[in-house]
Image: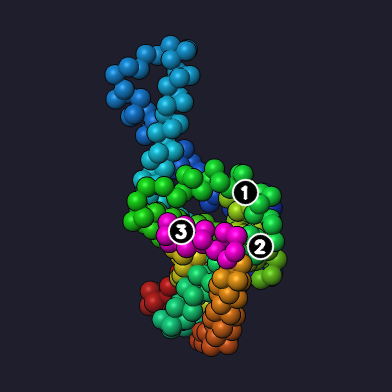
Amino acid sequence: MIRWAGRQERLNIPYLQRVWGLVYPWMIYQGVSMLVTFVFAYVMMMRDPNFVATAGSLTDHSLRLSEQVYQYYLPLSVVICLITIPLLLFFILRDRKKEVLEGFTAQVWEKSRPWGYALCFLCGVSACVVLNHVLMYSGVYGLLADDYESSASILYQGSMALELVAVGLLTPVAEELIFRGLIFRRLRWAVDAVPAMVLSALLFAIFHGNLLQGIYSFAIGVLLAFVYERTHSLLAPVFVHVGANLVSVLLTELEGLQSLYLKGNETAFLLVTGGMMLLFVIAFYLFYARVRPACVNDGTTAGTLSHEREDQYGT
């Protein structure tokens, strides 16, 4: 069972505390990233027998350290996610306890069926391909590719197995805990679903740091928030996000998209785009029409729920 607390008309949470509650989940990830990167750089620096702490040598050495950090970005991102995910889960569980203690009005919902998560995965796969093709075909990619290429060269390096684990699995889980599990849910305490979807997607877009990824992330962020609102389960947007990232890694590494962008392959490009668009429409329609978790109660005070029932709740 899943307990869901939506918009609350009366919450005694000061405005600045609300804003801080939307900012610090993001800062946790950034702080862990900085700490892990600093420790890695320090270890590499101490292991360098040629290191001499002078002003000139520090400048040269910092350039070499930057190159090493970029070279080991994926292993470092695995470490960052493995540290961050438990911290984020702690704050999510604390939020759920807060909802109980504050007496939030809660509805209890059944969990979605496994095939519902399969539809979420297909939505993520098809949405990723369609959005990337639209950005490519519209010319937006050509205008904004410079900033993205530098990020892509860091993300898509090393072995495919490491990319699948880091970019395809762990990063989506960490980002969903931040932007849907904490930020979106906290927005829903104060505003209705649509404003919360738009605001959380906007923050998700800003988080990615460049305009091209921002456009893509905003569109996919709205979808992720909608799926979470529909199912009340964090597993649903995780499956969407994992599907999108996995297909992105696979198509990049297997060069499945590059051949479509060559001159003379416009027909294949449009056929793939149309096929993936049809897949998205079918998967999303089935998700919207058939994935309807049943509401167990019509609304009760979260503080009155029995501990025995709470043990059954998912996140």
Q: Tell me the residue that label 1 is attached to.
A: 145
Disc on res. 80: none
Residue occupying the point 38% across, 74% down: 311
Q: Nearer the viewer, mark 3 or mark 1?
A: 3
Distance CA(mark 2)–CA(mark 3): 18 Å
Q: How is the image coloured?
A: rainbow
User: Reading the chain from its start, which is encountered first: label 2 or label 1?
Assistant: 2
Res. 58 in view: yes
Residue stretch in magenta = 250-265
Question: Residue 271, percent across and down?
Answer: 58, 74
Q: Tell me the residue that label 2 is attached to.
A: 137
- Extreme front residue here? 264
Q: Is residue 144 or residue 122 the one in the foreground?
A: 144
Label 3 crowding class (10 Å Cα cut-off): few <14, some 14-19, many 20+?
few
Q: Which element is circle 1 on?
A: helix
Q: Tell me the residue that label 3 is attached to.
A: 255
Vertical arrangement, residue 245 with respect to residue 212, above or below: below
User: Reading the chain from its start, which is encountered first: label 3 or label 1?
Assistant: 1
Q: Which element is circle 2 on?
A: helix
Residue occupying the point 37% across, 28% down: 42
**Quadrant of image for the N terminus:** bottom left
* In the image: residue 199, left or right of residue 158: right
Q: Is residue 207 or residue 195 the one in the foreground?
A: 207
Q: How many numbered markers are drawn?
A: 3
Distance CA(mark 2)–CA(mark 1): 13 Å
Q: Residue 264: say if magenta.
A: yes
Q: Residue 4: say if magenta.
A: no
Q: Is residue 177 or residue 172 the one in the foreground?
A: 172
Looking at the picture, which amino acid does disc 1 mark?
Ala
Q: Is residue 298 or residue 227 the one in the foreground?
A: 227
User: Reading the chain from its start, which is encountered first: label 2 or label 3?
Assistant: 2
Looking at the picture, which amino acid does disc 3 mark?
Glu
